[in-house]
Amino acid sequence: MIGRPLQSAAHPRGGRRWIRVLWPSFLIVIWVIGAALGGPYFGRIDEVSSNEQANYLPASAEATKVQQLRGEFSESNAIPAIVVFTSEQVLSEAQLEEIAAQITGLPAVAGVAEEVSPAIPSDDGRAVQVFVPIEPDAEIGKVVAELSRGLQDRVPEGVQVHVTGPAGFTADLLEAFTGIDGLLLGVALGAVFLILIAVYRSALLPLVVLSTSLFALCVALLCVWWLAKAGVFLLSGQTQGILFILVIGAATDYSLLYVSRFREALRSERTNWAATTRAVRGSLEPILASGGTVIAGLLCLLLSDLKSNSTLGPVAAVGIVFAMLSALTLLPSLLLILGRWAFWPRRPQFEPDVVAVEQGVHTTGLWARLGRKIASKSRPIWIAPTALLALGVIAATGFNATGVAQSNLVLGESQSRDGQVLLGEHFPGGSGTPALVVVPEEQLQMATDVMLDHSGVSNVSIVAADSPSGIAPVTADGIQALGPPGTPAPEPTVVDGAVLLQATLAEAPDSAAAEQTVRELREALAPAGALIGGVTATAIDTNDASIRDRNLIIPLILFVTLLIIAVLLRSLLAPLVLIASTVLSFGTALGVSALVFNHILGFPGADPGVPLYAFVFLVALGIDYNIFLMTRVREEALRHGTRPGILRGLTITGSVITSAGLVLAATFAALAVIPILFLAQLAFIVSFGVLLDTFIVRSLLVPALCYDIGAAIWWPSKLVHKGDGSAPSEMGKDALA
């Protein structure tokens, strides 16, 4: 503590020289070994990850049940690709023959199943579609790329070819995540390094901080990879990207807090060991509280019905654990060895007399001036930003999070998206990706009549093993024969008294019209015990589950966070203020994002999971800065009174929290390099929200409001009775004493 005898600080009780050397060396070696083992796994994450949307549906979802039953009706679990040949003119006989010749060679492509359909011409004669099944264990991205290249090279003159369908969109997602390891890390670490250089004006310290973050990520990745390998976690490219950013951002934030404490301690402690001991003691509680808040918020995702959410929680929590451990073990060990040289050329000097005069806080500079301004005009300073943020919250009503079409998930050029558009121009929109209807056999005709009567359904077929194509058309007159007159109608495949119908939708399977059709069919066929799945139904169930998760998990995160902060600050009122300010910041970030997405970037909408993810990260991470501030405020208030403690806490933590906020915003902004709509939107919302928290909420609103409330902010703790202290009354060197 400041003011204790120097000898006590320089010679900690029980401290032995060999411990001071061996212990940090041991910790550094352990982390180096862990990073060396985990580093190679950056290029292997795709071995244990999956980007199939159906894999992330809850077991209770109707689409999931149909997907499970589908395998019992057919031996093939192939993923369909749809090849579309189009021309501006009616296709000639020669062109059709050349297309047919190309189709016969498709089964020779590695990963393509034998059951390639014949060419199916459109009614207008300007397009042909072919259904190409891809083996489920094949590398879909490579197979689709080879199909596309081979067909493009041999396409008839005047004909365009596109590969679309479920396999095409999956290939787009896989391509979007290609090279995520190097690109994402490079952008994130580069941005953080530049910020740290600007903040510390040191070449060595940024490298130490980045090493701490990178080592944490390597060890976290090592653990996550093997847990995913064992089937404990379900990984996707999206989860991987968030894990990278979260660990880098959190570890850097915690490191900056420790560096600030260590630098502060070096001014009043002669030895590195004494400064390290003091810095660890001062940063332990806020880092554990901040990390615990993030972990608690992430683990709330376990209650999600969607596996994409429920698996992100523990995966990211593992990352946060190692971020905290690295900031509390590796970084102190490195700085213990380096000492003041870590800050070269701006090394902090041993100046206990100056520290004693300043009473542990600088009386000049931006944050000291802001503190004095808050002391004189606290009420206007917190009312103005509150009103401004409230205007942003109003705009949040325009945030469209009802879901987006699968074709819009990938930003930029997309062959599958273009192919889907062309498919819809020449064929029924749902060609190749029908709605799958499992219905009791005795309800077959009734279900067929209901679907054919719906304007959103073009035709209906049934799975029949003895049909040459594996399916047979069904009309109002029943199952139709395929072949010359007199050919008997095939018998449907029956599994446990149920049959599988395929309804080709009139609109594209990822369109709002198709979703409305499926919802109406589900309602109409529910009395018959029918289950409806397929691509459209999967999107519906995903969106519905996301909305349910959002309504359940957001209030729960608020409650858990409130409890943690209440225990940390021994108060009920202060946590309510901090939570309310963070929620206000989140609402404003969402409102500004709505304006940007709708009117500037022209995004088609957002996944229902975007607000949930943004809330988790903004509340769990954004509250960190309030925790860093208020733990220091409480520490200072115990010695100086509440109002002086608020000003002292603001002055002491101002620069480090601002730096941490810039770092976190920069790391989340790096997610925008991945051309996925979900991640691009998340990057903007979280980055903007963190900046709001850093520069407005934590710098102005919270300290000014707490100053205005005074000692009552600690209610019902005993600190209320300590009083407000002597507030600074004039601008000068003693203003913050």
Image (cartoon, rainbow, N blue to C red):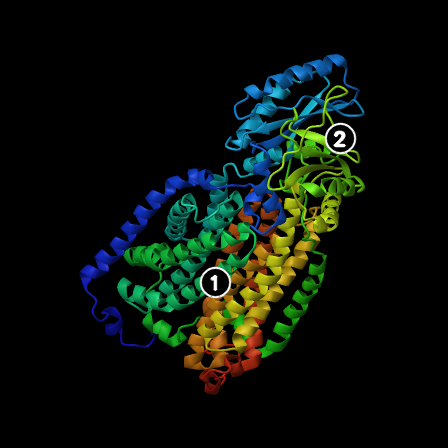
- Left or right: residue 726 compared with residue 606: left
User: Mark 1: which amino acid?
Assistant: Ala
Circle nearer the viewer, 2 or 1 = 2
Along the line of sight, the residue nearer the viewer: 198 or 630: 630
- Above or below 178: residue 264: below
Residue position for label 1: 296
Q: Which x, y percent locates residue 307?
A: 53, 50
Along the line of sight, the residue nearer the viewer: 6 or 568: 568
- Left or right: residue 347 compared with residue 374: left
- Above or below 726: residue 283: above
Specify whether residue 729 is in view: no
The quadrant in which residue 495 appears is top right
Crowd band around label 2 with a 10 angstrom C-alpha radius: few (<14), some (14–19), many (20+)? many
Specify whether residue 732 is in view: yes
Q: Quadrant of the C terminus?
A: bottom left
Q: Which mark is residue 427?
A: 2
Q: Which x, y percent locates residue 378?
A: 59, 76
